Amino acid sequence: MFDLILFTDGSVDTKTRIGFGAYLAVGDMELPLDDLKPHVKVKQFENTSSTKLELQTLLWAIDDALLSSMEQTVRVVIYSDSQNIAGLPARRNGLEQRDYFASNGKRLHNAELYQQFFKLIDRCDFQIIKVEGHKPQRAKSHVDHVFTLVDKASRSALREFNR
């Protein structure tokens, strides 16, 4: 059993660059969805993009849920539909070798967030599971239904903000 299971997602308005990240920290995956829904947390981020928001949300979720004051190693499973987050561990060596600079010599936009992410995964036993977002209802597993809670929370918060 893992010590912490996190579901994260975000929605951003590309015109205003305001986004909302949502996460759910779960200890027991077998709880009914109605019991989990009230525990979804939402936070507003400014001057962001979809890629940046996914990272900001994940870092906030980890910090808020458990790890900011943790001394010992904890196992964490992260469910996200972000290709960027899912691919970061495989990109780490290349990013560090280039000191977070692109081939054109410019510093990567999210370099600081990538570095924070790698510091966190060095402190914990991480597993990142890529969730396929927006599946048809009949094709959804329990994990997909739980992920839908954070997806809907971030999208609803953004819609409410834009009213």
Image (spheres, rainbow, N blue to C red):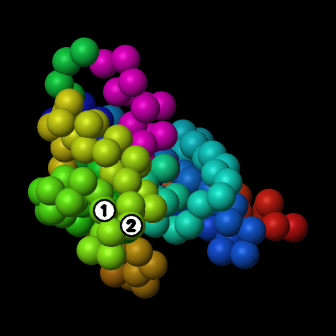
Give the left or right position of residue 111, taking residue 150 as reference.
left
Q: Position of residue 157 (x, y in %)?
A: 70, 58
Q: Position of residue 87 (x, y in %)?
A: 23, 66
Quick one: 149 or 50, which is closer to the camera? 50
The local secondary structure at tag 1 comes to loop
Give the left or right position of residue 53, taking residue 69 as reference.
right
Residue under circle 2?
106
Q: Is residue 50 above or below residue 95?
A: below
Mark 1: few, some, or many residues within 10 Å (few <14, many ≥20)?
Answer: some
Residue under circle 1?
101
Q: Is residue 143 above or below residue 63?
A: below
Quick one: 115 or 55, which is closer to the camera? 115
- Residue type indicated by callout 1: Phe
Q: Is residue 96 above or below residue 28?
A: below
Residue at image x 43%, y 32%?
63
Q: Position of residue 36 (x, y in %)?
A: 49, 44
- Residue type indicated by callout 2: Lys
Magenta stretch: dominant SS?
helix
The local secondary structure at tag 2 comes to loop
Residue at image x 38%, y 61%?
107
Residue at image x 27%, y 74%?
103
The residue range painted magenta reads 57-70
Quarter of the figure with the C terminus: bottom right
Mark 2: few, some, or many residues within 10 Å (few <14, many ≥20)?
Answer: few
Quick one: 46 or 136, which is closer to the camera? 46
